[in-house]
């Protein structure tokens, strides 16, 4: 991202003030934010200043920052961060923004920029000799289906050719920019196909009144045709009697003592089923056999496994053990037999007299 700096001091005006209309609009913008959050209105207020002066001046940034009660450096941060703010003077009659993103580039935006270089200035953000026109390359302007396109102030001009762009530049340079109609420049309406509509040519097909009228007409025609169709239709043979419905099977339903699956209990019901009746209707669990439970497959039994040996008593991992308990008994006895140097009862090695 390129560094964005304010214009030179020689180009900066001494002061800034909103005109009456923009001052009222600024107050409305500030009211949209809750108390204590008025500083968030700096973005729309800077846009108002740019629409009034044509570009954002240092005096405008400082004045708006003071209006919102925020440090001026914060206002400078916002103005220099967003590329929508023009920090240098632009053309007084038109500042042309040519889209250079992929769809427009594939449709010839480079040729449009060559026209701007030849008719305005070779470099971007520079005005022509009279100071009435300037241009720049921007990212997507949102009308990719009508590429290539450009924007002047808030109006977009789409489906451009180099010849048409040269005509628009000449009209703006002559002060007749208001005569240029925004939108597609090849005659199509909005984003419709250039050859014209192929579907939905009439709104009658999608209006609710049309659908209701057609529905009523179809219903009436069906009712009128019912007697004639009934008289002309042959008498159908008697249909065979329908088989009696088969009751659902209970084969897959589990038998259990649980109240939720008891077939004798229908919820909600005030009748309680005796536990004896529940047990009689349930399937008894198989008897437990420790021998069978411990028996494994022959392939598993053949695997060498450590099944014998001393069994250590399981203790919880969090069980506390004193440090002396962790020493093996033999080492503990040897350590206890050997007196310590600080023990006063230790023999000195002198023979008794």
Image (cartoon, rainbow, N blue to C red):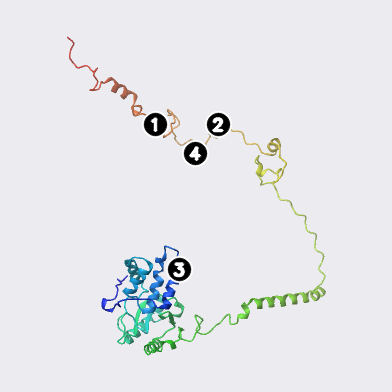
Q: Position of residue 169 (x, y in %)?
A: 38, 87
Residue 44, how many percent across, how many down?
Answer: 41, 72
Q: Secondary structure at mark 2?
A: helix
State the mark number for residue 162: none
Q: Is residue 101 visible?
A: no
* Outermost residue, front side: 20
Give me the disc on residue 299.
4
Q: CA distance from mark 2 to mark 1?
A: 38 Å
Disc 1 to disc 4, C-alpha distance:
42 Å
Residue 344 x %, y %: 23, 19
Which mark lies nearer to you, 2 or 4?
2
The residue lying furthest to the top in this view is 353
Q: Which residue is mark 2?
A: 291
Quarter of the figure with the N terminus: bottom left
Residue carrying label 3? 31
Instruction: Compare marks 2 and 4 and give the one earlier in the sequence.
Output: 2
Sequence-first tag of 4 and 3: 3
The residue mark sitting in front, 2 or 1, is: 1
Mark toward the start of the polypeptide (2 vs 1): 2
Tell how many labels.
4
Q: Are marks 2 and 4 in contact (CB under 8 Å)?
A: no
Local crowd size for mark 2, using a 10 Å CA cut-off: few (<14), some (14–19), many (≥20) = few
Number of residues whose C-alpha sits closer than 10 Å to that of mark 3, classed few (under 14), some (14–19) or many (20 or more): few
Determine the CA span between mark 1 and mark 3. 68 Å
Q: Position of residue 177 (x, y in %)?
A: 41, 87
């Amino acid at each position: 991202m390129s560094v964005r700096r304010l214009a030179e001091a020689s180009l900066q005006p001494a002061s800034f003030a909103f005109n009456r209309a923009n001052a009222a609009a600024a107050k409305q913008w500030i009211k949209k934010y809750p108390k204590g959050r008025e500083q968030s209105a700096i973005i729309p207020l800077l846009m108002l200043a740019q629409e009034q002066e044509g570009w954002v001046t240092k005096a405008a940034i400082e004045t708006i920052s003071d209006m919102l009660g925020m440090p001026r450096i914060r206002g400078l941060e916002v103005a220099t961060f967003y590329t929508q703010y023009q920090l240098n003077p632009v053309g007084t009659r038109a500042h042309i923004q040519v889209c250079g993103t992929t769809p427009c580039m594939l449709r010839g935006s480079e040729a449009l920029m060559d026209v701007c270089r030849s008719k305005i200035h070779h470099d971007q953000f520079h005005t022509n000799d009279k100071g009435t026109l300037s241009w720049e390359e921007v990212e997507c302007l949102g009308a990719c289906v009508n590429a290539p396109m450009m924007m002047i102030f808030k109006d977009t001009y789409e489906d451009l050719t180099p010849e048409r762009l040269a005509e628009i530049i000449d009209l703006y340079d002559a002060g007749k920019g208001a005569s240029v109609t925004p939108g597609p420049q090849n005659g199509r309406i909005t984003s419709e196909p250039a050859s014209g509509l192929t579907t939905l040519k009439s709104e009658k097909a999608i209006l609710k009144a049309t659908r209701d009228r057609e529905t009523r007409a179809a219903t009436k025609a069906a009712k009128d045709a019912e007697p004639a169709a009934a008289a002309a239709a042959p008498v159908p043979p008697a249909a065979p009697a329908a088989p009696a419905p088969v009751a659902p099977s209970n084969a897959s339903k589990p038998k259990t003592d649980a109240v939720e699956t008891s077939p004798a209990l229908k919820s909600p019901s005030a009748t309680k089923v005796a536990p004896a009746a529940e047990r009689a209707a349930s399937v008894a669990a198989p008897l437990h056999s420790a021998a069978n439970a411990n028996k494994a497959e022959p392939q598993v039994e053949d695997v060498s496994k450590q099944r014998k040996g001393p069994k250590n008593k399981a203790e919880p991992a969090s069980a506390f053990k004193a440090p002396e308990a962790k020493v093996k008994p033999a080492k503990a006895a040897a350590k206890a037999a050997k007196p310590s140097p600080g023990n006063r009862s230790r023999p000195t090695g002198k023979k008794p007299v």
